[in-house]
Image (tube, grey):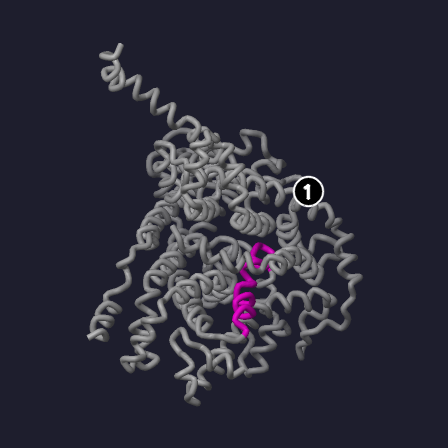
Amino acid sequence: MKNNLPEERSSLSYKAKRLFKRNWSGWLLMLPGLLLFVFFVWAPLAQNVILSFSETNGFEAAGFNNFENYIRVFEDPMFTKALANTFKYIFWSIIIGFLVPVFLGLLLSEVVHFKSFFRLGIYFPAIVSGIAVVIMWSYLFDPNPGAVLNQILSAMGIPASQFLSNPKLTIPLIVVTMTWRGAGGTVLVYLSALQNIDNSQYEAARMDGAGVCSRIWHVTLPHIKPTIRMLFILQIISVFQVFYEPLVMTSGGPDGASVSLLLLSYQYAFQSFDAGASAAVGVILALIIIALTVVYLRLSTPKKDKISRRWKKYAEKTSK
Amino acid sequence: MLKRLQSKSGGILTAADYKKRGFRAVYVLILFILFVAVLTALIPVLWLFLSSFKEAGELTSTPYHLFPKAFDIKKLVEVWNMLNFWQYFLNTIIVVIGAVICSVLFNGLLAYTFAIVKPKGYKIFFALVMASYMIPAITSIVPLYNQIVNMQLINSYIPLWFMFGANAYYLIMFKNYFESLPKALFEAAEMDKCGKFKTFFKIVVPMSRPIIGVVAIFTMTAAWSDFLLPYLILQDESMMTVMVKIYNLQSTMGSVQGFGPDKLLMILTISILPQILIFAIFQKQITGSSAAGAVKE
């Protein structure tokens, strides 16, 4: 009996039994949550890949058809437009959506009066997001010369604008509404990063006679650089998630000037009932987003020595 | 006013800087810019409130009038009754309650296994969650829709509830929180032969009230304004949520007798009031934790 034991312990069935014994309750606990992820996220994603390589009958796959869906999508001028728009969205969301929160976060961290009022006020739009607010914006951008924004423009001596119906303005204006909704959350992220900066480092810089600009450049920015980098990637990712704004405000118009890839995927499915093309665009989008997410996660894993070289050099210099 | 400035010791600018006149001017400028930012955040919604009390003809005018001629609360009642809005409100509340329960229970339980129980193989699933974390459901909406049709869950709230049980964002918030709980607690629970399921409800849940509250609040507002899946699934008029009804009203406006833009604006006001109410009640929890969830992986 005693001699048998070690042998039995190393046997495969014993190992499997032990593995099961140790883990079954954990697996059981994981099951409900994972099933929901399978149903709502992973299975649809996997089926979408299959669908994108399939002939479709209604919304169901009906036989492999190679890359035909992808070719059809690439040949569609609307897809070219959506792709070009993606770059426009990225451009404007960097100019408006990315820079505004950095700036506001910096100001908010410096203020000692009305701080919670400012914080609440700036965050407020995030909580009323939803389709109702998007509709509200489409009324604010009413091109009627008697409507509110055009009246303000005319008071300033600027001719009435077509706003969203002007293909040159439609994407920047959509980005404005997205920034209005999203900036508050981002500002709070910057604020918490800024408040984590050790005060002694400012102190050291001040002792060294560093002016305000030099303090921002050598102390503040290097310390929030990881946050900035991360939120930059998030900002790019958010462009690939653009959907509700063009759906409600412009339906992607005028003439495709604001159509986003995600909206195009939706329109393929529920307007032209071409599930194959919709899936193809969906798969392309999912791949782009997964790639960006990997970059994002790499950047967001906190590492102690990640604070940039500029700060280290500066710290060395000042300590001498 | 000045006293608080004189005692400011941290940050880029300190009391020493504010001794100089120039920096005090800079500070006033900072205050001014932040006021403008807050106004920009509030004004569109204020505009909506004011405009929703206007008559149809009042919406556009030269010169422009910001305020309506009369604040007639009757208009609110009239629009509400005309659309029988109770129905949509109740439907939405049913969706929100189910979503909050599913969101807290399923994301919480899964986060507990990822953070504390750690059964063999959990890392694969966590990696999968993280990889798909930012992919919007719309990218694969057709297969999801097919699944729901095949399970005969069209015109049912069940998928809308359970969808919130598979939310990577809430899951990560829970996981971060659970990982910060003292390890000794769980070791003690194991010594006492307290089952893992029991440990969750007896130890983890009571210690996690703050994060449960935050996820519940976030789910509440998210479920309230959720649109696409409800729109695709709730085809029966009597099942629709507020957001679905609003979208339908907007896209069919003109075909409904006596329903114009002014009434739509009133409906928009009504629909965002509950969110503002939630914000007003839970402002601290909301602004306190929105940063925490977003940064950590």
Question: Residue sitting at 50 percent across and 41 percent down?
Answer: B204
Left/right placement of residue A306 relative to residue B268 reads: left
- For the residue pair A140 and B157, the one nearer the viewer reads as B157
| Figure check: B114 above or below A216 | above
Give the extent of the magenta segment.
A114-135
Residue matched to label 1: B237
- Figure quadrant of residue B230: top right
- Figure quadrant of residue B231: top right
Q: Quadrant of the N terminus of chain B?
A: bottom right
The amino acid marked with disc number 1 is Glu
> Which x, y percent locates residue A149?
58, 73
> Which x, y percent locates residue A312?
24, 67
- Residue B251 is a magenta residue: no
> Which x, y percent locates residue B105?
54, 39
Question: Residue sitting at 60 percent across and 57 percent down?
Answer: B282
| Figure check: B251 above or below B122 | below
- For the residue pair B224 and A287, the one nearer the viewer reads as B224
Looking at the rendered structure, the secondary structure element under dot 1 is helix
Residue A57 visible here: no
Left/right placement of residue B114 relative to residue B229 reads: left
Residue B161 visible here: yes
Mark 1 belongs to chain:
B
Question: Residue sitting at 33 percent across and 38 percent down?
Answer: A67
- For the residue pair A13 and A174, the one nearer the viewer reads as A13
| Figure check: B99 above or below A249 | above
